[in-house]
Image: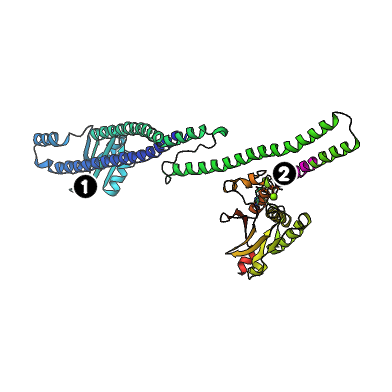
Amino acid sequence: MKIRNRLSNFYTLVAGSLLMIISIVIFFASSSYRENAFYQRLSERVQVTEQLFLEKESLSAEVYQSIRDKFLHFLPEEIEYVGTVEQFEKVAQDSLVDVLPSDFVAEVQESGFAEFHKGTKQGAGRLYTHNNRRYAVVVIASDQYGLAYINRLRNLLVVGVGIALLLIWVTSRAVARQALKPIAKKVREAQMIGASNLHLRLEVHNSKDELGQLAIAFNDLLDRLEKAFNWQKNFVRNASHELRNPLAAILGHSELVLRKTRSKEDYVEALQNIHREASRLNHLVNNILQLMPVKDSDMLPSQERLRLDELLLEAQETLRLTRPNNQVRVDWDNMPEDPNSMEIEGNANLLQSALVNLLDNACKFSNNQPVEVAFQQVHNAIELSIRDHGIGIPPEEREKVFQPLHRAGNARGYKGSGLGLALAQRIVELHHGAIELDPRDEEGTRVNLKFPVAAQQLMEV
Ligand code: ATP
Ligand code: MG
């Protein structure tokens, strides 16, 4: 069921229930008021009848009858009884047996006064003593006008509530449709957005209302999707480009050498070329495979408490194997005073691999010129900066170099496949850290890393 229908049904139900309760209260209050008012009239009649009966002896029969006709017989379907209690008992059993309730006579005798309501008839009876004899006066009548009024009121309420419900349902549907119109518009806008126009966004008319916030959240989601989508697109494009080059070289060398019979030296040279390209391919594929599991998961394989300065020393050792002439200098003099603030939680292998990649870049793109590494404690985090004096990264490439397989234009002369930085970024993010290129650098490159200090350390501080 659409929200629009649900809303209008809900409001109709709530308003209908309220109207129904109010109508029932009005009906029963009016009904009870009518009944009481008629009892009041009946008991007044009983008194008048009683008075008249007492005066009867002093009046002539004609006068008595004319007063009776004039004042008493105007209640609809009125039955009036005045007589001794014994006679009344007899009359009650004979002619009034269908009209009076069974316990009425006994109640009148017991309490001296009683009222009853049976079907459309109401009655009142009183006991009084005159000349040492007990008499009963009973007046029974039907409140035809009052009952007709109550019936009319009931019909009016039923029809009124019915019409009101219909009106509420129709108007609430219209209001709901009007209120939900902007949502329907947003749905249409969202339906227009697809892979080919992922740059489109929903319009935000008022950022403070719920719809505006929904549109903002949806646009944020689109931002992230677009980023991920572009990441994949660039990755596939760069990967196919990078894989095609060594493959083309392997095919070229092999086709050339197979064209005719060649000397042993030629075969050796061709095989060496093929081997070199195959090694490049192998390195590339290995790097891609290394990136994938880290890229896809949000969990670290295993975690332990590590010291960042120790990790750096180990990374330097590893770097020395591939770049024995590196000039990485760590600023040990300006270390944070508390050695415990160097402790972070993480996976040693992954963190080392990230550090080696960054140190390797710094050495490679500066042709082994000095590289400065420094630590700094900032609140609950430890920062590490790696600074080189190499070719630098052009400002327009700063965002892109974190994409896998992307290499800046000025890096063409240097070996590499463009995966190290992407891998390092992913590893740092998995450790809830941050990596950024310091934009202040005019000469060379400065990479800043930031990791949260391990939890227990923080509690001790
Ligand atoms: P790989 O690390 O896969 O061997 P790579 O070093 O070229 O290859 P990344 O480490 O991912 O790739 O770096 C991506 C690009 O960022 C580099 O190609 C280069 O253009 C730029 N870059 C990274 N670090 C530096 C640096 N210290 N100085 C200058 N450019 C850099
Ligand atoms: Mg690299």
As drawn, the label of residue 288 is: 2
* Colour basis: rainbow
In this rendered view, identify the residue nearer to me: 390 or 454: 390
Q: Amino acid at mark 1?
A: Tyr
Q: Residues within 10 Å of mark 1 (few under 14, many from 20)?
A: some
Question: Closer to the N terminus: mark 1 or mark 2?
Answer: 1
Chain part drawn in magenta? 277-293
Please count the marks in the image. Answer: 2
Q: Amino acid at mark 2?
A: Ile
- Left-right relation of 10 to 157: right
In this rendered view, identify the residue nearer to me: 19 or 335: 335
* Residue shown at 77% from the left, 41% from the top: 281
Image quarter of the C terminus: bottom right
Q: Is label 1's Cβ within 8 Å of ligand 1?
A: no
Q: Is label 2's Cβ within 8 Å of ligand 1?
A: no
Question: Residue pushed farthest top?
Answer: 259
As drawn, the label of residue 128 is: 1
From the viewer's perspective, is residue 218 above or below residue 366?
above
Instruction: Check if residue 202 falls in the magenta segment.
Output: no
- Left-right relation of 121 to 287: left
**How far apart in space, not on screen, are marks 1 and 2 (Cα)?**
115 Å
The reply to whether residue 189 is in sight is yes
Residue 418 x/y as whole percent:
68, 45
